[in-house]
Image (spheres, helix red, strand yellow):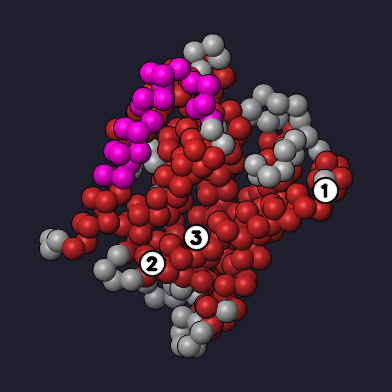
Amino acid sequence: MKLTPGYAFLVFYWAYVIGILLGSVIWGFTLGSAGGGPLAFVNNLQQADAMHIEYAIAGGAVFNVANLLLVAAIDIAGLAVAFPVGIGLALVVLAIILDALAYRRRERERRSISARGIWISIACGVLMGTFYPLVTKAVTGPGSLGPYSVAFFFAIGTALCALPVNYLLMKRPLTGAAPVSMAQYFKAKPVWHFWGVVGGLIWCTGMIFNFVASHAQMVGPAVSYAIGQGATMVSAVWGVFIWKEFASAPPESRRLIPAMFIFFLIGLASIAIAPMFGR
């Protein structure tokens, strides 16, 4: 998205969803089909029951709403703030508090907008904490889905939800920006569509690897999801060091950023080593 300046995310998002769908199919027919067996992509699609498929689609729909809120928050607050607050809401609380405080101090002269960015991030965090249990239900029990087939139906749920929700937000953007139309999508530069699809492919790849990890007996869904939140640190690094979102912030704001990174890393490390200890 940062490589498409002036291109509204709500328009960019259509190509992003295409990338997620495309990625789920590509990985399903490649790694997801290697070795055959009942969990192979096509075999698993054929044996899965309706209830597990519905859980996967519902997970994708919840994720879609959370993701749209996340990017609205990124538009307002930047990567370095929206990702840690939104994605890590219930994961590493102290790090999130420090990050939010740094943002508040940076935005002293834009308090109404600042507050909106934080609240949208919090709403995103609540929903982001809801979609993974639905995915877990989709891959548990008889007639369940494997990691590659659950990703496929998850992507379908994301796309189905995007049709009404993203269209509504195009008309009423949460950021307070002017409404956008589908005409802007078709008028966009081809390279902008390309980056949207690449963004979706990248996210889908990470999602599938996370689902695969959650199938490992030692890891499991809870630890896999938590460790996957290392993405939060990657985004914060991009926001702080690459896009320099805090470059003009006052010194007291910048001083809180290292502490945020430290506490987040401590939290992730604690979760990562937890399976090594017996119950």
Could you tell me if residue 247 is visible in this image? yes
Residue 208 in the image, given as x and y percentages of width and height = 49, 65
In the picture of the structure, the residue carrying the numbered disc 1 is 189
Q: Residues within 10 Å of mark 3 (few under 14, many from 20)?
A: many
Q: Secondary structure at mark 2?
A: helix
The region drawn magenta spans: 245-266
Q: If you read the primary sequence from the N terminus, does the residue marked by circle 2 or circle 1 appear first?
A: 1
Residue 144 — which label? none
As shown in the figure, which amino acid type bears the numbered disc 3?
Answer: Met
Residue 207 — which label? 3
The residue that appears at 12% across and 63% down in the rendered structure is: 278
* Image quadrant in which the C terminus is located: bottom left
Near-viewer residue (168 or 35) = 35
Q: Secondary structure at mark 1?
A: loop
Could you tell me if residue 52 is visible in this image? no
Question: From the viewer's perspective, is the residue at label 3 or at label 1 nearer?
Answer: 1
The residue that appears at 59% across and 67% down in the rendered structure is: 24
As shown in the figure, which amino acid type bears the numbered disc 2?
Answer: Ala
Q: Residue furthest top?
A: 109
Q: If you read the primary sequence from the N terminus, does the residue marked by circle 3 or circle 1 appear first?
A: 1
Majority secondary structure of magenta residues: helix
The residue that appears at 35% across and 54% down in the rendered structure is: 227
Residue at mark 3 to residue at mark 2: CA–CA distance: 10 Å
Residue at mark 3 to residue at mark 1: CA–CA distance: 28 Å
As shown in the figure, which amino acid type bears the numbered disc 1?
Answer: Lys
Q: Is residue 152 above or below residue 169?
A: below
* Image quadrant in which the N terminus is located: top right
In the picture of the structure, the residue carrying the numbered disc 2 is 213
Q: Tell me, yes or no, whether the highlighted magenta stretch contains residue 21.
A: no
